[in-house]
Image (cartoon, helix red, strand yellow):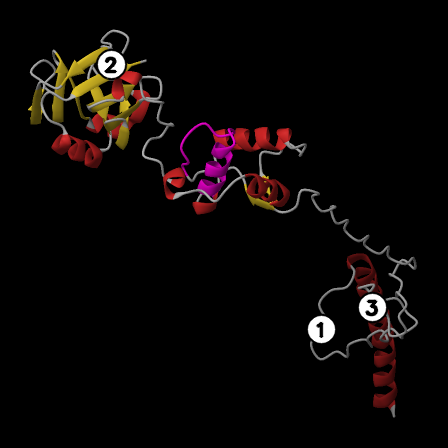
Amino acid sequence: MIRTKRTGRGHAHGGGRGAAAATAAVAVLALTAVTTGCGPQAAGSTPSAAPPAPTSAEPTDDAKPGADGTVTATPSGSPEPSTPPRSTPPPDPQGKVLMASGSQGKQVRELQARLRQIGHFDRSPTGYYGTVTVAAVQSFQGKRGLTRTGKADTLTWQKLLGMTHVPTAAELDPPTTRPVAKPDKRCMTGRVICISKNSRSLSWMIDGKVLSSMDVRFGSQYTPTREGTFSVYWKSRHHVSTIYHSAMPYAMFFSGGQAVHYSSDFAARGYNGASHGCVNVRDEGKIASLFAQVHNGDKVVVYG
């Protein structure tokens, strides 16, 4: 009994101090939990119960129509505004655009040929819808009371079809870039190489009939091509200039050192360059054919 009481007193004293220490530790842990917020859940502990799922009367996050066809409110309690429908632009009164700047192909070539028939396109069809074609279409539209868009829309195309005929092969793919000029009267008899500086074209004619035509370029202002009536006095198939050391294939000389001949520079650079007085031809196939037909003594007429 005496041992038991002594032990009891010792336990009671120690227990009091232990209980106080335990109480203080719990308080510290509680304060720590309040000040740091939610931390990771300890292993083996029981997770708190999840909040109940929202009922049909509670708001959702997607604001989609509910089962009854009504729009469910957002969490703020106010209905989400519906997206207004996009306005559709009114249709173009002149219809669908068929061709515009940058278009290319057979239909563009036909458009250009038809515009050329009625004086709105002043050069040979190229099949490419560039600035010249835009201007030609605007000119046609303005004359017909249409909006001058420069685009070949349905209404513009239909009006053009009604005013023109189906282009011929020669109209779609003429022999020269620019229209061939009306031949000078000196070209109307005999065998003549008829050359127009204004249209920059050469026509091979026999008794007033044009057999072939081709693009040509001339000398610069410092070395101009002479104008007048001449005759071919020498033909040289593989000629090379003794002055400039440049090739002059299919050369047909008609006035001193000036000749009609093929020019690879003309073929490559077009009208950006000039000759030293000769008549340059850029189509090698055409000049080869002409060279085979022309005889020494045939007439050459060069006019403005």
Give the alpha-carbon distance from disc 1 to disc 3, as whole Å.
16 Å
Q: Is residue 113 magenta?
A: yes
Who comes first in sequence, dot 2 or dot 1?
A: 1
Residue that badge 2 annotates = 219
Residue 172 versus residue 80: which sits nearer the camera? 172
Residue range corresponding to the magenta coloring: 108-126
Q: What residue type is disc 2 on?
A: Gly
Q: Who's the residue at 40% across and 37% down the image?
A: 126
Side of 209 relative to 37 (left or right):
left
- Closer to the observer: label 2 or label 1? 2
Classed neighbour count for the residue bearing mark 2: other residues with Cα under 10 Å, few (<14), some (14–19), many (≥20): some
Residue 294 versus residue 142: which sits nearer the camera? 294
Q: Quadrant of residue 143?
A: top right
* Residue 159 place in picture, x, y as percent: 61, 41
Residue 89 versus residue 118: which sits nearer the camera? 118
Who comes first in sequence, dot 3 or dot 2?
A: 3
Who comes first in sequence, dot 1 or dot 3?
A: 3
Q: In which quarter of the image is the N terminus?
A: bottom right
Q: What residue type is disc 3 on?
A: Val
Q: In this view, does 12 lie above or below 34?
A: below
Q: What residue type is disc 1 on?
A: Ala
Residue that badge 3 annotates = 26
Residue that badge 1 annotates = 42
Residues at discs 1 and 3 in contact (Cβ within 8 Å): no
SS class of the residue under badge 2?
loop
